[in-house]
């Protein structure tokens, strides 16, 4: 783990790759009763994660499409557009519906603790988590005034703010309905946990938006990390925990899976914040430096602001002024964050939180082979680059 952390701190890009000699073990057998959820060797991490994501998308898409088809009129049309399944005029499309990380976590957790039968039983739960995730995206795009997502205009820029907000509300309702009508014995506990998660992530989002109105020197790193856990870590933790519930796991294992997802979620957010500053728009689907232009107090920015360096003072001065389009503002601001240590700190912290995630995973799933799919997904969230 030290090697992985050192590489993340030294890398010029946020690869954050975690070595397979993690706390869940160093070797995994190539044979597995459920190859879609289990490890297949030390060298196949990226391929394994990609296969899990594809399989998760194939499993949940029918549930998602059926749920969205139940929405009336414009609600359904806007939702289908947001998911990439329709163009703005309502004609069919085949655009990107997202990476499916959260449903993949649900299914991998269920498979790790309950095998193929549990994984199959958890498909509706996985779809519910993906619906909640997209509810947050629809609302976040409005609040952040983001104009691009997944390489296409955001829903609110096409259909208006009111429709985007209402569709987000409807999509969240669909998620809760999916679980509430699921006959599985774990469904009641799952819907309660998901509802609690929605409250927590909304609280995190509220803190995030409130931070944007505060002076740069007033925001602490501790509260920013707490906000990130609520805003991002909570849903990944919930996803992993729901898989455990549908596998019939013991309470302590479900809580360990929740903690695993939260730590992985923090690592995810740290790398996402790095990409938000230094990401390549051709890969991210978002304008370069969008977070800096909006003067967002993301984790690398707050780490830089609180570093006590001359670059931190320069950054604070830049953040007190509105973004000036057509100038070198973004380049100067990104350079100040980097010189103040924000980028290196974020990458090192991402590796550290991944180490903690692996420790929690080893509590819930002691077998390295059984934990392989979850390990591959956890590695995936910090393997992304700019």
Image (cartoon, rainbow, N blue to C red):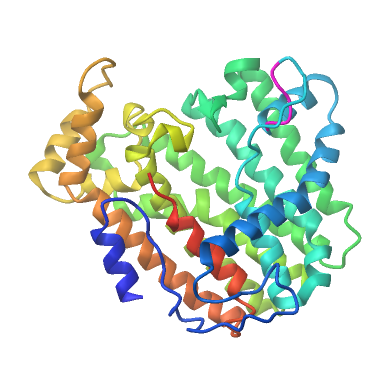
Q: Is residue 161 magenta?
A: no
Where the N terminus falls, by quadrant? bottom left
Tally the numbered discs: 0
Q: Is residue 302 above or below residue 285?
A: below
Q: Nearer the viewer, residue 170 or 119?
A: 119
Position of residue 158 measured from the top left corner of the image (x, y, whole percent): 62, 16
Determine the residue positioned at 65% across, 32% down. 95
With respect to residue 298, does 7 lie above or below?
below
Is 119 displayed left or right of 130 in the figure? right
The quarter holding residue 40 reads bottom right
Left/right placement of residue 327 relative to residue 187 reads: left
Is 354 in front, or is 116? 116
Tell me if residue 240 comes above or below residue 370 in the rendering: above
Residue 282 % position (x, y)? 44, 33
Q: Residue at x 77, y 23 (%)?
A: 77
Image x and y of residue 10, in percent: 23, 60
- Residue 326 occupies quadrant: top left
In this view, which residue lies farthest toward the right?
A: 183
For this view, does 149 lie left or right of residue 241? left
The residue at the point 27 percent across, 68 percent down is: 6
Depth order, front residue of 124/227: 124
Q: Which residues are magenta?
A: 84-88
Task: Name the image quarter holding the C terminus.
Answer: top left
| Residue 371 seen | yes
Q: Position of residue 198 (x, y in %)?
A: 64, 48
Q: Quadrant of residue 216?
A: top left
**Residue 261 visible here:** no
Give the residue furthest to the left: 310
Helix, strand or loop for the magenta stretch, by majority: loop
């Amino acid at each position: 783990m030290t090697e992985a952390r050192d590489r993340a701190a030294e890398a010029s890009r946020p690869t954050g790759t975690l070595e397979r000699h993690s706390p869940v073990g160093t070797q995994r057998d190539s044979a597995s009763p459920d190859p879609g959820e289990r490890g297949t060797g030390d060298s196949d991490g990226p391929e394994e994660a990609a296969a899990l994501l594809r399989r998760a998308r194939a499993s949940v898409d029918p549930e998602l499409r059926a749920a969205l088809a139940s929405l009336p009129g414009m609600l359904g049309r806007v939702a289908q557009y947001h998911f990439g399944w329709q163009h703005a005029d309502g004609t069919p499309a085949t655009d990107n519906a997202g990476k499916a990380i959260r449903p993949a976590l649900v299914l991998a957790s269920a498979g790790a603790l309950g095998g193929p039968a549990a994984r199959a039983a958890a498909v509706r739960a996985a779809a519910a988590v993906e619906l909640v995730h997209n509810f947050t995206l629809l609302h976040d795009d409005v609040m952040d005034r983001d104009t691009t997502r997944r390489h296409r205009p955001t829903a609110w820029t096409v259909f208006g703010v009111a429709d985007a907000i209402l569709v987000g509300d409807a999509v969240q309702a669909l998620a809760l309905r999916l679980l509430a009508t699921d006959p599985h014995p774990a469904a009641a506990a799952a819907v309660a946990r998901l509802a609690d998660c929605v409250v927590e992530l909304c609280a995190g989002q509220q803190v995030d938006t409130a931070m944007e109105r505060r002076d740069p020197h007033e925001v602490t790193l501790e509260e920013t990390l707490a906000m990130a856990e609520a805003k991002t870590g909570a849903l990944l933790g919930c996803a992993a925990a729901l898989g455990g519930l549908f596998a019939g796991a013991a309470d302590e294992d479900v809580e360990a899976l929740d903690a695993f997802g939260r730590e992985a979620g923090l690592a995810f957010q740290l790398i996402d914040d790095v990409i938000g500053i230094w990401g390549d728009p051709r890969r991210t689907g978002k304008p370069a430096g969008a977070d800096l232009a909006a003067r967002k107090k993301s984790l690398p920015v707050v780490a830089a602001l609180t570093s006590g360096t001359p670059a931190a003072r320069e950054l604070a001065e830049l953040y007190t002024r509105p973004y000036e389009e057509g100038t070198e503002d973004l380049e100067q601001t990104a350079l100040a964050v980097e010189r103040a240590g924000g980028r290196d700190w974020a990458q090192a912290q991402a590796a550290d939180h991944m180490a903690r995630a692996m420790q929690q995973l080893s509590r819930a799933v002691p077998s390295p082979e059984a934990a392989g799919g979850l390990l591959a997904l956890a590695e995936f969230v910090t393997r992304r680059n700019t």
